[in-house]
Amino acid sequence: MTTLQLRWKNPASNTPLSFGPFNSTTQIRWKKPANTAQTRLENRTRDPNLDKLTAHYRRLKLILNLYDVVSARKRGPFLSVQSLSKWAPHAGIKTVTAGDLLRKYPHIFEVFTHPIKRNLCCKFREKFVILLNQEDDVVSQNEDENVMRIRKILMMSVNGTIHLHALRLLRTELGLPENFRDSIIIKYDEVFRMVDLEVVELIDRNDKDGSFGVAKVESWRKKEYTEKWLSEFEVKYAFPIHFPTGFKIEPGSREKLKNWQRLPYVKPYERELTYHLNPQTTETMEPSSRCDELTSRSAVVGKHTFGGVERYEKRAVAIIHEVLSLTVEKSVPVERLAHFKKDLGIVVNIRELLLKHPGIFYISTKGIAEIVFLREAYSKGCLIEPNPIYDLRRNMLDLLLLGNRHTSELKTERELKDEPKDMTDDENGWESREGDFVIPILESFTDHEDNDNMN
């Protein structure tokens, strides 16, 4: 009788072990697949339009960084091609050589010969510089909108204060000028007050006219209620949901989403702790049970109450949704949102929260950093409701994406003067091209043959 021996490898020593009576009860424990934020980010349903837009804006951001580096030079707004290879890495351009950069974006860069040194130099084209100057002009002229954005963020904050470094990180996204501390915060001293060198406070948090304390999503809810005749119970706390193409809805997720849409929460601009303990009944907590922090709306909802965690996360979703609605392009780097967590009272992990709601937010990893988009604001990679700053940035992106097309329009006056001028016929307006002198010779030759044939 022969005995059958099964052998397997020991994972520690990588040596085969025999299967016998002494190790017959040994079990191999298989690891459960990890379900972390990183794995959910890798396995999410991609949006090709937003990913492509992020990749394009990544290249534009590098070009703008290079413009800041070149324009800061004291010798003039141009530099030699040899110096460009040294300055480009400081702007984050490390994978493309200077020559390839100039050849790839002829609508952005202009190459010319220095009149004295006779070496190749480059500078940014006038059309691109005009767009940058127009953007600065539009940003400086929108003081009222900038005051409104900063005021709304302060109204959502815990104590009515916010750190300036967080606003500096979102300065471009919010459309604020570079010196917004002096031109907006200090200038409007009846609205803002500097508590510290890096902390700004809202003087009056009471919304008297009722225009500042209304979230952007409320307009969508009103439209759904009036135009689609949906009940207030279905719309009052709902958010617009737009899943990407190819998104697989798991069994039972529709019912969970429906219940989450109906779940009440403390809205971003609400200062009192009023929320529904039961979706069918509205109850308000007694004033004696409130503490000083409850008026700040951060640690408002008890996490151990019925649906407390879901309500708390839904309020965080509403705050992030409102911050994205205040931006120019409805998109923000994820890592910069983390600087608002303490001021806005967001305790949960922001990236995991964004991945948990793919119908409201979308995270793209095609840029320099992870960018979160507001899904309802985009359609086929374009902003549904554009603004002047977005239009100017889009025009810069169009110049970038032109590549080597329509380069005949880029000829300078010096190049046009150096080109030989074509002679034109004044009567017919025909241009004489190379080889046209052969035509009269051939015509005379044919006339001579015809005369011989006639004779």
Image (tube, rainbow, N blue to C red):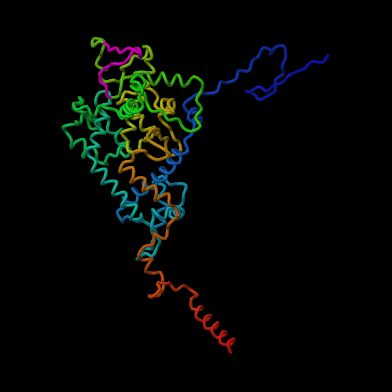
Residue 42, position as x, y percentages in the image? 50, 31
Q: Which quadrant is home to the N terminus?
A: top right
452 to 147, vertically: above or below: below
Q: Is residue 29 shown left or right of residue 291?
A: right
292 to 395, vertically: above or below: above
Residue 369, position as x, y percentages in the image? 42, 36
- Nearest the eye: 199 or 369: 369
- Nearest the eye: 389 or 258: 258
Q: Residue at x 40, y 73 (%)?
A: 428
Q: Is residue 121 shown left or right of residue 167?
A: right
Of all residues, the one furthest to the front in this rendering is 454
Q: Quadrant of residue 18?
A: top right
Q: Which quadrant is home to the C terminus?
A: bottom right
Residue 232, position as x, y percentages in the image? 33, 20
Q: Quadrant of residue 51?
A: top left
How many numbered marks have been drawn onto this rendered protein structure?
A: 0
Of all residues, the one furthest to the right in this rendering is 1
Of all residues, the one furthest to the bottom in this rendering is 455
Q: Residue at x 36, y 62 (%)?
A: 412
221 to 281, vertically: above or below: below
Q: Residue at x 66, y 25 (%)?
A: 14
Q: Residue at x 38, y 17 (%)?
A: 309
Q: Is residue 271 magenta?
A: yes
Q: Give the magenta range.
A: 269-285
Residue 260, position as x, y percentages in the image? 40, 20
332 to 104, vertically: above or below: above
Q: Is residue 369 magenta?
A: no
